[in-house]
Image (spheres, rainbow, N blue to C red):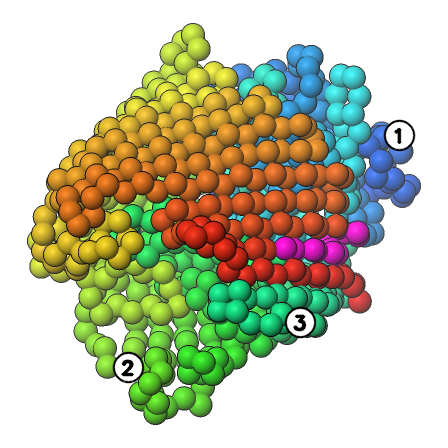
Amino acid sequence: MYKGLLFLCFCFCGFSLLAQKRKDSYGEGSVKPSSQTVSDHKKNAAYKIHIRRTDSPIHIDGILDEPGWKMAEVADSFFMVLPMDTSRARVKTEVRMTYDAHFVYLSAVCHDAVPGPYMVESMHRDWSFVKNDNFIFFLDPFDDETNGFTFGANAAGGQWDGSMYEGGKVDLSWDNKWISKVKRYPDRWVLEMAIPFKTLRYKKGITRWGINFSRNDLKTTEKSSWTPVPRQFPTASLAYTGVLVWDTIPPEPGTNISVIPYLLTQVGKSYSPASPSAYKTTIGGDAKISVTSSLNLDLTVNPDFSQVEVDKQVIDLSRYELFYPEKRQFFLENGDQFTNFGYSDLRPFFSRRIGLGVPIEFGGRLSGKLDRNWRIGAMDMQTGSVDSTGLPRQNFAVLALQRKIFARSNIGFLFVNKQSLAYQPGKDSTLPQYSMYNRSIGMEYNLASANNFWTGKMLLLKSFSPGKSGHDWVQAGNLQYSDRHWLINGAYQYSGRNFNAEVGYVPRQGYVKLNPQINYYFFPSGGSVLTHGPQFISTYYYNENFHQTDHENMLTWLITFRNKATLAPVVIQDYVKLLAPFDPTNTGIDSLKLGTQHHWNTVGLDFVSKPQSVFTYDFSLRYGGFYDNGTKLTFSNDIGYRFQPFVSIALSTSYNVLKLPQPWGNNTFWLIGPRIDVTMTNTLFFTAFIQYNQQIKNMNINTRLQWRYKPASDLFIVYTDNYYSTPFSVRNRAVVLKFTYWWNI
């Protein structure tokens, strides 16, 4: 095992040093390639747009009649990325940029290539890129090809903003103050925006930033980019940005302190068990302080997350804990160093362990760039006690450091500490017992070659818990190669049986996992099929003595049509040797015995309809064996209809039929979730979400009205209801009125 770890480390370092930079030739545009480069490794350094200061005011109205726009340089002649990346874009886009002492301004003129209505989901913030006609751009203010920001809008004026990390991933939970306007004409739509310098984080004195512009046009099924980007990568890939050249050093943002207080009034009532209505008024808030132009301090006192949408439920037939994503903005914003450390099924830190079912009293987070190569993230949260369960006050501290090495790779360090305060374990034997402390420490190397063809990770973790020592390590790694035709990935994990990350998400311990994957893509020269090819994924688990416990082999043939619909037949082969008693229905009927072995095969079909329609749908079908020589049929689908841009109606359905021997017999589980989103304007939204889950015999209603009465300031009215389904009766209900205000000092 350790020899394998050293071998993978050697391979990763070697590939990081030897990854080659292709020298492609591209045609000319209005902003022409130059022979000068910002740095040796930057792929598209030859693509430059100059930004010059304007002395005349810019009015954000979608009408480009100000002198500043007439003087600005134009970036046009975009490259096609999809369907193919071998030509110029068919749709024409023109981008201009300028600035003054307080704002960066951008305008985009998005011309039509064919007539017809624009396709948008709604005017809601942070829409889906693939389902909207839109323009977005990516800003790399450190020119490190790793971290940055993204802004944009769809053709109806719905805004998009997010922070960027790991060279091309976008965190849409980042929400800040900026303004934009979209104006529509018979043959084009025009976006105009103003972004305050105080909204951005950037290094003082740098006059060259990374930048790229991206356009999605559903009528022509074309995605395009100002700089050339290979089709296998997102246009958000910061490895392929061009250069934004400032005519002088960008102005300093100056004092940047924001206070965001909230006032909440809530009434709730429990019907089972019955209790009187409970009224509560709460105040609290957050503060954002710019320590430097690239380093931010976030503080929170008595935070409240009542406006966060409820989790999307699933039918749970798994042997291990399910993962539900974090939705609370304080933990999501600028949190990638914490939440993306490790792998999706091996996370030393999972913020949902903090503050669910227990009040958070206060906390703080320091995050940002120390310089071009160093990033830091430090968070400390304090939770209150719960007398009914004996849970003591607890402190959660996380420290993350990241150092960029080579062209785009980095080394990261993470420390997580959970500490119970003023607590004596065993003092009251009638209550649950809690640990005095739990700690995890880890280091990872993230490989990203200059052209993004080679990526990978090497991970090492250790936990510290009272009474547990030995076999408390984790080793994991993967190496992936991706080009136009091939995606090849090899991954492995080892987790000791005593590895204990109480603030993490580690659903199983004491295993070795091997996980190879290989995809190949064919590109027909014509016809309705754009690309097709096989995808093979194999997952094998072994115990610490390297005896196999389970595996899954899956073969898929993915077909992507030119209209962006996809079809994928699939064949799956499973084997499980139970490491603990397990109820295959997860309803408490009975359990299969420890050590029993189970084999089965499954066939299936997945389909996703074309996104450029007001009526969209997808489905997934699986039929095959199950535990104890049983059978399982699973059908799930999503149906959506848009009265664009104001109303979006969707229905999610999951239907499971299990046929098992007694005592389980035949079981049918329905999960039905209708949803309606109404956007009266791009600042007034209403959402209603209903879920009926037959497996847990529950129905939930969650409605939310949000009025963004000024940038980043909101009024929420939230109503929730929970019902027993058999017999039908009310469990509990609540109404919340919440008012937030963003105040710049």
Instruction: Give the residue at mark 3.
Output: 279
**CA separation, marks 2 and 1?**
69 Å
Q: Mark 3 against mark 1, which lies toward the viewer?
A: 3
Mainly helix, strand or loop, the magenta region? strand
Q: Quadrant of the N terminus?
A: bottom left
The image position of residue 250, as x and y in percent, is: 74, 51
Residue receiving disc 1: 65
Foreground residue, 105 or 180?
Answer: 180
Q: Could you tell me the amino acid type at mark 1?
A: Asp
As drawn, 591 above or below 275: above
Categorize mark 3 by other alpha carbons within 10 Å: few (<14), some (14-19), many (20+): few
What's the residue type where badge 3 is placed? Tyr
Residue at x 49% of width, y 26% of height = 617
The magenta region covers: 708-719
- The numbered dot on residue 466 is 2
Q: Secondary structure at mark 1?
A: loop
Could you tell me which secondary element the residue under label 3 belongs to? strand
Q: Is residue 475 visible?
A: no
